[in-house]
Amino acid sequence: MVIEPPRSVTQPNDQALRARARRVIPGGMYGHMTAGPIVPPSYPQFWDHVDGPYGWDVDGTRHIDLLCGFGPMVLGYRNPVVESAAAAQAAYGDTMTGPSARMVELAELLTDTIAHADWSMFAKNGTDATATAVRIARAATGKTKLLKATPAYHGANDWFTPMLSGVAPGDRANIDYFDYNDSASLEAKVAEHSGDIAAIILTPFQHDSRKPQELVDPEFARAARTLTTGEGAALILDEVRTGIRLDLRGAWETIGVRPDLTAYSKAIANGHPIAAVVGIDALKEAASSIYVTGSFWYSAVPMAAAKATIEHALAIDAPTRIASAGELLKRGIEEQGAHLGAQISGPLQMPYLSFADDPELTVAMAFTDSAIRHGVLMHPWHTMFLSTAHTEDVIDDVLRRTARAFDEIAVLKN
Ligand SMILES: Cc1ncc(COP(=O)(O)O)c(C=O)c1O
């Protein structure tokens, strides 16, 4: 296989679009997809098209994409099974005056698939799903406080966004914070707010950016379960980032901890816009008492895509396949970068790359920059995401390129 030489950082089409965007889009771009100065200079802002594990930027360069749209793509971009289901539905209609039968079929599929799910509601984004779950918990308990880990991200609305610009202090008044995997800090917060806790919200593992990822300590998950039950509060699992990739039955099934409510989005329709909240029977009445809605929440195409995604992911055991790719990647990168203390943390399906003694991410930035110029789209401080399109051959190709990137930064360091 021929590997093309590293491309230069100059990307004329991308630069031209950035300049035009700065005139008509605040900041030129916003949110988690901002390329800007915080990621390596080679990181493209604008994309042209995608296919399987690949994305082509607006300058025509092909990247092996280890970000998968920051999670939504799990079965390969433009997966034929999913796209034909979406196209078949699109031929009938998408946004109509009410939902299609796909809504009921999808709710049935989710309740059959997810161990604790007795019902489902749908929305568009992960933020809708976490906000809806919290509202259900408050409606069910009549209590107000929400306990969350510091600084866990659960969405971009006023009470979760990590940037405080434009946020009124009152918007945070009913939230308090504990440390992930620290049962004592959670117990202390529960004791402090006892009698007024609506919910504890947790992600299946600690995936804060800019630091190695921590898998959940099963004792901590069990403590969260026991404490919420004891308080009559709801345990919300935020699977927006992990859903489909780790375990279709629920990320904590393997450790035997079942939440009361779970929020999904990102991968559940392999890139089509949809979110879901699933919950237990005891919360069904509260869920039907709240008013949540959106113009596009009932659109039929993403629901058809979600059905196809979940059915196909179950049929091919997507999490196991993706974990095998992750194992190969982890082994390869850690071997190639051993001299720099390269470490891949987090679940195998969602690798996070870090280097020893790299508090300012200098090595991570240099390596990622080089990897991107060698055709592998990586991120220096965010979880990456693998898919079933990242086959053994694709990961071998990734590793041939990262070997060159490690060589290149060794030269730069000398
Ligand atoms: C754990 C988690 N929860 C919630 C969200 C919010 O999802 P969305 O961006 O679709 O609103 C995200 C997004 O990255 C997330 O990672």
Image: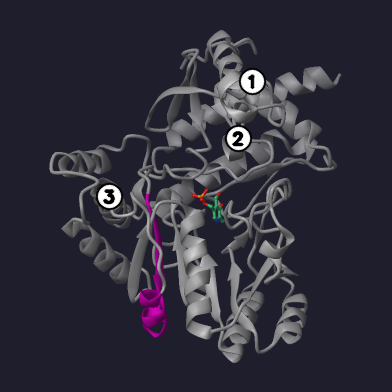
Which of the two labelled residues, at mark 2 and mark 3, occupies the earlier sequence position? 2
Q: Amino acid at mark 3?
A: Ser
First along the sequence among labels 3 and 1: 1
- Amino acid tagged 2: Tyr
Question: Tag 2: Cα neighbours inside 10 Å, few (<14), some, or many (≥20)?
Answer: few
Secondary element at tag 3 = loop
Location of residue 119 with respect to 248 vertically, above or below: below
Q: Pointer 2 and pointer 1: residues touching (CB < 8 Å)?
A: no
Local crowd size for mark 1, using a 10 Å CA cut-off: few (<14), some (14–19), many (≥20): some
Residue visible at 50% across and 32% down in the picture? 65
Picture coordinates of residue 272, whole percent (x, y) = 35, 44
Question: Which disc is residue 42 wearing?
Answer: 1
State the CA–CA distance, disc 2 to disc 1. 18 Å
Residue at the far left in the pictured view: 92
State which tag comes first along the sequence, 2 or 1: 2
Q: Marks 2 and 3, Cα distance to the nearest angstrom?
A: 26 Å
Say which mark, if any, is on residue 30: 2
The span from disc 3 to disc 1 (Cα, nearest Å) is 37 Å
